[in-house]
């Protein structure tokens, strides 16, 4: 399968998967669940979905369990929405990249607010 085709399939599955997850009524899956990335194998039989879930570690574990228990429903819905030869079997993996990015942004904001007062001191150190 051509690389551009696999990329298109990954993005299409990601888009539909996000829509299906929004429709799930499992209380373990919070509303702030985002599909970060989906990788479908070249034979279209398996897919690994990286999901970002806001909350503590216990909430993330419970949400992944909820997604795994709904994997059959998700597979059926994806199969009905997409015209693929095979409908992939999903594996869900917790991804903390969005939370990590929010943490980095917070640190940068703190540096920016604190750095304005110390900018003169830092430049004098570099001049010596």
Image (cartoon, rainbow, N blue to C red):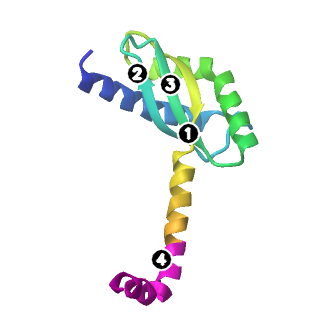
Q: CA distance from mark 2 to mark 3?
A: 17 Å
Location of residue 110 with respect to 35 vertically, above or below: below
Mark 1 Cα shell of 10 Å, populated few (<14), some (14-19), many (≥20): some
Examine the image and state in which quarter residue 76 appears.
top right
Location of residue 86 with respect to 65 vertically, above or below: above
Name the residue located 71 percent from the left edge and 35 percent from the top edge: 61
The boundaries of the magenta stretch are 110-128
Disc number at residue 95? 1
For the stretch drawn in magenta, the main secondary structure is: helix
Q: Seen in the image, is 62 located left or right of residue 9?
A: right
Residue 47 percent location from the top left of the image: 48, 21
Residue receiving disc 2:
82
Disc number at residue 112? 4
Q: Nearer the viewer, mark 4 or mark 3?
A: 4
Mark 4 Cα shell of 10 Å, populated few (<14), some (14-19), many (≥20): few
Q: CA distance from mark 4 to mark 3?
A: 38 Å
Q: CA distance from mark 1 to mark 3?
A: 11 Å
């Amino acid at each position: 399968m051509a690389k551009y085709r696999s990329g298109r399939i990954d993005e299409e599955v990601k888009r539909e998967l996000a829509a299906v997850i929004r429709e799930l009524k499992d209380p373990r899956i919070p509303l702030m669940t985002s599909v970060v990335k989906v990788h479908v194998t070249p034979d279209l039989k398996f897919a690994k979905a990286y999901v970002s879930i806001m909350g503590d570690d216990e909430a993330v574990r419970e949400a992944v369990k909820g997604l795994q228990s709904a994997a059959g429903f998700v597979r059926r819905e994806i199969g009905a929405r997409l015209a693929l030869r095979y409908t992939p079997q999903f594996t869900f993996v917790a991804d903390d990249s969005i939370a990590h990015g929010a943490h980095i942004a917070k640190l940068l904001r703190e540096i920016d607010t604190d750095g304005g007062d110390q900018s003169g001191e830092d430049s004098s150190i570099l001049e010596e």
